[in-house]
Structure formats: C-alpha cells, structure tokens
Amino acid sequence: MWIILILIGLISGILGSMGLGGGTILIPILSLINVTQKNAQVINVFSFVFVAFFILIFYIKQGYTQVFPAICFSFFGVISATMTALLVKDTSSQTIKICFAIFLILVAIYELFVFIKKYAGKK
C-alpha cells in the first residue's frame, strides 16, 4: 500500500509542478482505492499546499512568474475556496463526485476541441 501511495504522490507532484493540477489525477486515483470523495479532496488540498509552496519559491527564483498577479489570484482563490468549502460541507460525497466528473468531462471536451483546431489545419 505504501508503494501505491508514494507513486500517487510522485505523479500528482509532477503534474502539479507543471501547472496541470495534481488533483486532476490524485482525486480519481484516491477514489479508485476507496477513499471517499471528501477525504480525497482534503488530501488533495493538503498535498497541494506543500507542492505549491515549494514550486512557487522555485518559479519566483527562476523569474518564471509575476508576483503581483499571483498574489491577486491567490487572494481571490482563498476567498472563493473558503466560500465553496462552507457551501459543500453538508453536500454528499456522491454529489461532489458527480460534479467533479462533469468538470473533468468538460475539460476533456474542451482540450479535444483545442487539439482538433490546432492540428486539423496542419494537414
């Protein structure tokens, strides 16, 4: 079990450091190993705090980010995340799981259209 957890952490850390959102892979994988949706989201947020902190320091030192927009996005992200956490605290894990699945499907459809648009014209 420890090896599986380590592999999941490594994969989500790699994706998170690339800005792809480690939770996109972490939450579904945790759901597959019978972690409830709410617990998977809490684990995701907990791990994200540490990943984000270290990656942010690296990106700032390398000059890859503009600090002011990052602070603005973070401030409003904290506000919206707090409000959402208060709204979903009494929501069932099943409902949250369905909402997350719909979100992933919409992102996949969007990415598919972007891919088609980008590569359809290259023939």
Image: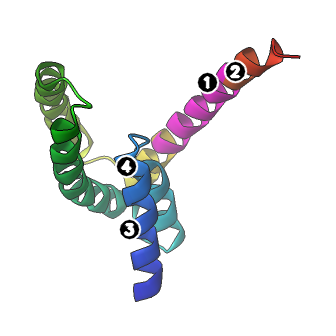
Secondary structure under tag 1 reads helix
Q: Main secondary structure of the magenta part?
A: helix
Q: CA distance from mark 4 to mark 1?
A: 20 Å
Q: CA distance from mark 2 to mark 4?
A: 23 Å
- Badge 4 vs badge 1, beta-carbon distance below 8 Å: no
Sequence-first tag of 3 and 4: 3
Q: What numbered label is drawn on residue 16?
A: 4
Q: Tell me the quarter of the picture where residue 40 sits.
A: bottom left
Amino acid at the residue labelled 1:
Tyr
Secondary structure under tag 2 reads helix
The residue located at (17%, 26%) in the rendering is 70
The residue located at (17%, 19%) in the rendering is 69
Residue, disc 2: 113
Query: Which residue is at the front of the view, 66 or 98?
Result: 66
Question: What range of the chain is rendered magenta?
Answer: 100-114
Point out residue 64 in the picture as x, y percentages from the top left corner.
Answer: 27, 31
Residue, disc 1: 110
Which dot, 1 or 3, sits closer to the camera?
3
Q: Is 108 covered by the magenta stretch?
A: yes
Above or below for 9 versus 46: below
Q: What numbered label is drawn on residue 9?
A: 3
